[in-house]
Amino acid sequence: MDVAADLRAQLLRLVPDERRVSDGESVLDQHSADLSYHPPHRPDVVVFPESTGEVARVLEWADEARVPIVPFGAGTSLEGHVIPLHGGISLDLTRLSAIVALRPYDLTVTLQPGVTRSQLEAAAGPHGLWFPVDPGADATLGGMAATNASGTTTVRYGGMRAHVLALEVVLPGGRVVRTGSRAVKTSAGYNLTNLFVGSEGTLGVITELTLRLHPIPDHIVVSRAAFPSVESACRAAAAIIGSGVLVTRCELLDAMTIAALNAFSGTDFPTSPYLFIEFGGTEAGVAGDLVTTRELAEDEGATAFESESDPTARARMWGARHNALMASLALAPGSKAMTTDVAVPVSELASAIEQARRALDESGLRGGIVGHVGDGNFHVAFLLDPNDAASIAQAEALNALVVEDALARGGTCTGEHGIGFGKLGYLEQEHGDLIPLFRGIKQLFDPNGIMNPGKVLP
Ligand SMILES: Cc1cc2nc3c(=O)[nH]c(=O)nc-3n(C[C@H](O)[C@H](O)[C@H](O)COP(=O)(O)OP(=O)(O)OC[C@H]3O[C@@H](n4cnc5c(N)ncnc54)[C@H](O)[C@@H]3O)c2cc1C
C-alpha cells in the first residue's frame, strides 16, 4: 500500500467520512500553494474536521505517528505558511465555521476558526457592530489569529492581538486547552493567548476564538488626495495622525500602483502618489477632522482633495485599494509577486520608502508600493517570473536591501504577514539572540515537531 493511501485509511478511522479525508489530485493541489512566488508542495492527504473532537483525534494520532500537520484557513498568507514542505496532513479548518455566540452588550463574539472576515461582518452588522481587522483578502479568523493579521484599520483599532480575548487550542497529542477569558482584561499568568496569536500553526490548532467587536461609527467619510511625491504624502500622514485627528484608515498608494489600478479597475485618478484616508465618528467630529486634514495635506502640496460619505462610493474606493496587488500583477501577466512587509518608526517612513523606490527603479524590476502609513508599514510588490531563477534572485536581493534598511532604522522585517518560510533568514537577522528561546517554546508545545514543520523556525 502506498504511503498516502495508508495515511488516508488511518485517518478515515478518526474522521469516518470519505468526503472529508481526501487525496484527490485537485484537493491536494489546492492545499499545496499560496498566492506568492513560493514553489508548491503537496500534502499527502487533506482532512476537513467538523469538531474540536475530530481535530484532537487527528492530532493525537499524528503526534504518535510523527506525521506533519499543516493547519489551513483560506490559504491567503504570503510567505509559504500553508505549503506542506514535508507532506503529511493539510488540516483544512473551513468546515469549523459556526458563530457560537454574538454578545452585542459585551461587544464580543465567540466563533470557530473557519468563519471568514466577511461572514463575521454579515453577522455583526445587523447589531450595529463590526470587526475592524481587515487584511484585504477574505481570510478566516483562525488564519488571521495565527498570523497576527492587521491591515488598513490598524492605525485606529490595532491588529489581531488587540482583538483576541480567548482561544481554544488543540495541542499536538490531542490535549485541548483554553486561554484568556470573556472579560476584556486579565492579568492571570503568562499571556498564552498572545503566544498562540502569530504562531502560524507551529504550536497548536486554534479551534475557537473569542474576539472584541466595535460599534459601527455613526458617520463615515473617506477622502483622497494626490501628492507631488511619496515623501510629501508620508509627511502629511504623520502630521495628520500627530494632530490627533481620529483616522480609521490612512493608506499610501504610489504613482505606479495608481496607474495599475486605473488600468485594472477602470478608475481615472491622476497618476501621482495618493493618500486614501477614512474618518469615523459623529458628524460634527468628522467635519472638524476633515478641515484639519485638508489643511495639513495642502501644507504638503496635496491636490485633488476629494471626500465622499456615500457607502457605495466608499466601498468602491476601498475595493480599488484592496485590488492593488492584483492590479500590479495584471501589469505583467503570468508574473508572481514577492511582497515585502517591513515596518519602521513613522519618522523613518518617508526616507525608507524613498530608498526602496530608488532601489526598485535602478534594478529594472517592476513593482508598486503601498503602505499602511499610519503604522509605518509598507509593501513593495516585486513582480517576477516564477520560472526565471534570475528574476527571483534579483527580487530576493532587493527584498534583502529593504529589510536591512528597515532593521537599521529600528524597524522589523514583517509588520503583518509573518515569517512562514519566506522570511526565516530575516527573523534570524532581526532576532538571532532570541532563536534559542523560540526553540525552547516550540519544544515545550510540540516536542515531536509535527506542527507546520519548517515554518517560523528552520
Ligand atoms: C491581496 C492580499 C492582501 C493581503 N493584505 C494583508 C494585509 O493587509 N495584512 C495582513 O496581515 N495580511 C495580508 N495578507 C495576507 C493574508 O490575508 C493574512 O496573512 C491572513 O491572516 C491569512 O489568513 P488565512 O485564513 O488565509 O490563513 P492561511 O493562509 O490559511 O494560514 C495562515 C497561517 O495560519 C495557520 N493557520 C490557519 N488556520 C489556523 C488555525 N485555526 N489554527 C492554527 N493555525 C492556523 C496556517 O498553518 C498558516 O501558517 C494579504 C493577502 C493577500 C492575498
Image (cartoon, helix red, strand yellow):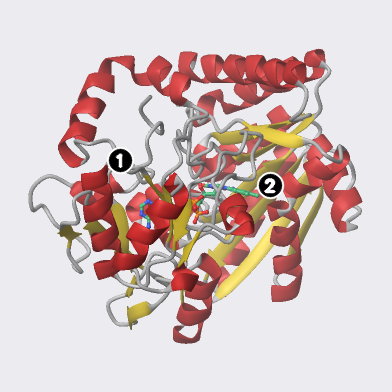
Quarter of the figure with residue 370: top right
Amino acid residing under circle 2: Glu
- Mark 1 Cα shell of 10 Å, populated few (<14), some (14-19), many (≥20): many
Q: Position of residue 109 (x, y in %)?
A: 34, 74
Amino acid residing under circle 1: Ile
State the residue position of label 1: 450
Q: Earlier in the sequence, mark 2 or mark 1?
A: 2
Q: Is residue 445 above or below residue 108?
A: above
- Can residue 137 be seen in this snapshot? no
State the residue position of label 2: 295
Q: Is residue 355 above or below residue 86?
A: above
Q: Position of residue 123 (x, y in %)?
A: 47, 81
* Front label number (2 vs 1): 1
Q: Is residue 432 left or right of residue 114?
A: left
Residue in the picture at 70% in, 71% down: 309
Residue in the picture at 90% in, 45% down: 270
Quarter of the figure with residue 455: top left
Looking at the image, which is closer to me, 402 or 226? 402
- Mark 2 Cα shell of 10 Å, populated few (<14), some (14-19), many (≥20): some
Q: Helix, strand or loop at disc 2?
A: helix
Quarter of the figure with residue 280: bottom right
Total tally of numbered discs in the picture: 2
